[in-house]
Image (cartoon, rainbow, N blue to C red):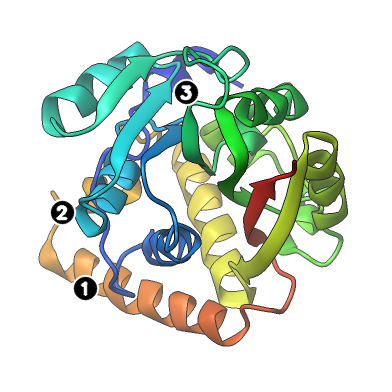
């Protein structure tokens, strides 16, 4: 896996909306649901270019929003575009904030990239106040019933190489990790079901076959393409999102977990 390539890419720099035509629709929807009773300060760990947490801010103007990422290039980009977000460069294993500083912490599509996800969870617990909300989206590519897990067993490594997915979680391992870090899970919803898995794996295999590397996210990349490509993406994305809404309680290849920090 080329770490220099992964660190040079600005992940998650574009805004998303509460529309099923957006790739991040369900992540935003379930995150806002998790924050419905939260006031005060929130932090996104592994914010990339800041598009996701800026989208949260667009729907929750009352929140004071912070964002941290190890990628200095992404932080500079986010700071330039999203002036109302407090960005910092920092490591998930040593967050640059004091104990119990935040009322909620978010981590979206990050734990699977980390060599020591348990260490990051413990650090997140440190900066979160007692009974504060912790919301996470994590791929479950270690579950036996997922297409990704089957492909990994057959030697497929396109997503590990191109997206840096070095951890393949199961829901059992995640629940255990959350508990060890001092979190009590209060809500679980699933996404990336059958069609979503086929499209996701197919997309990364397509990139691999073409030996193509994206320097920005798919949504931003397509914004510069012909309109027909955006229309196709919108239609397929909407079908995938509605599939996952209908099957939100059926275990799948991605999980949205809301937890609270135990007393």
Give the x, y percent position of residue 243: 53, 83
Is 72 left or right of 176, judged from the image as shown? left
Question: SS of the residue at dot 3?
Answer: helix
Q: Earlier in the sequence, mark 2 or mark 1?
A: 2
The answer to which of 89 and 132 lies nearer the viewer is 132
Packing grade of label 1 (10 A; few <14, some 14-19, many >=20) is few
Gap in angstroms between the C-alphas marked 3 and 1 = 28 Å
Question: SS of the residue at dot 2?
Answer: loop
Q: Identify whether 201 is placed above or below 234.
A: above
Gap in angstroms between the C-alphas marked 3 and 2 = 23 Å
Q: Identify whether 137 is placed above or below 46.
A: below
Gap in angstroms between the C-alphas marked 2 and 1 = 11 Å
Q: Identify whether 38 is placed above or below 217.
A: below
- Name the residue rendered at 53%, 34% in the picture: 162
Q: Earlier in the sequence, mark 3 or mark 2?
A: 3
The answer to which of 103 and 112 lies nearer the viewer is 103
Q: Identify whether 262 is placed above or below 115.
A: below
Packing grade of label 3 (10 A; few <14, some 14-19, many >=20) is some
- Name the residue rendered at 83%, 43% in the picture: 179
- Which mark, by number, is residue 225? 2
Is 19 left or right of 163, judged from the image as shown? left
Is 131 left or right of 97, judged from the image as shown? right
Q: Quadrant of the C terminus?
A: top right
- Badges 2 and 1: C-beta atoms under 8 Å apart? no
The answer to which of 88 and 138 lies nearer the viewer is 88
Quick check: can you spot residue 154? no
Give the x, y percent position of residue 106: 50, 42
Question: Which residue lies under the disc numbered 1?
Answer: 231
Question: SS of the residue at dot 1?
Answer: helix
Q: Quadrant of the N terminus?
A: top right
- Which mark, by number, is residue 6? 3
Q: Earlier in the sequence, mark 3 or mark 1?
A: 3
């Amino acid at each position: 896996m080329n770490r220099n390539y992964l660190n040079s890419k600005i992940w998650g720099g574009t805004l998303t909306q509460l529309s099923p035509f957006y790739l991040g629709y369900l992540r935003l929807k379930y995150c806002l649901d998790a924050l419905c009773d939260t006031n005060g300060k929130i932090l996104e760990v592994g914010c990339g270019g800041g598009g996701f947490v800026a989208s949260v801010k667009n729907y929750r103007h009352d929140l004071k929003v912070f964002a941290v990422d190890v990628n200095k290039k992404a932080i500079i980009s986010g700071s330039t575009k999203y002036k109302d977000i407090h960005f910092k460069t920092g490591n998930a294993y040593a967050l640059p904030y004091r104990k119990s500083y935040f009322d909620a912490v978010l981590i979206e599509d990050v734990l699977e990239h980390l060599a020591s996800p348990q260490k990051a969870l413990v650090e997140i617990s440190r900066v979160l106040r007692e009974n504060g909300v912790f919301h996470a989206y994590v791929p479950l590519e270690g579950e036996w019933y997922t297409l990704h897990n089957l492909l990994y067993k057959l030697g497929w490594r396109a997503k590990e190489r191109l997206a840096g997915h070095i951890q393949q979680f199961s829901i059992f391992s995640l629940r255990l990790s959350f508990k060890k870090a001092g979190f009590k899970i209060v809500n679980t919803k699933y996404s990336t079901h059958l069609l979503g898995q086929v499209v996701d794996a197919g997309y990364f295999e397509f990139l691999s076959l073409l030996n193509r590397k994206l320097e920005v996210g798919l949504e931003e990349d397509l914004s510069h393409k012909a309109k027909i490509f955006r229309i196709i993406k919108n239609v397929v994305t909407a079908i995938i999102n509605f599939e996952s809404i209908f099957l939100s309680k059926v275990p799948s290849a991605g999980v949205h977990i809301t937890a609270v920090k135990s007393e």
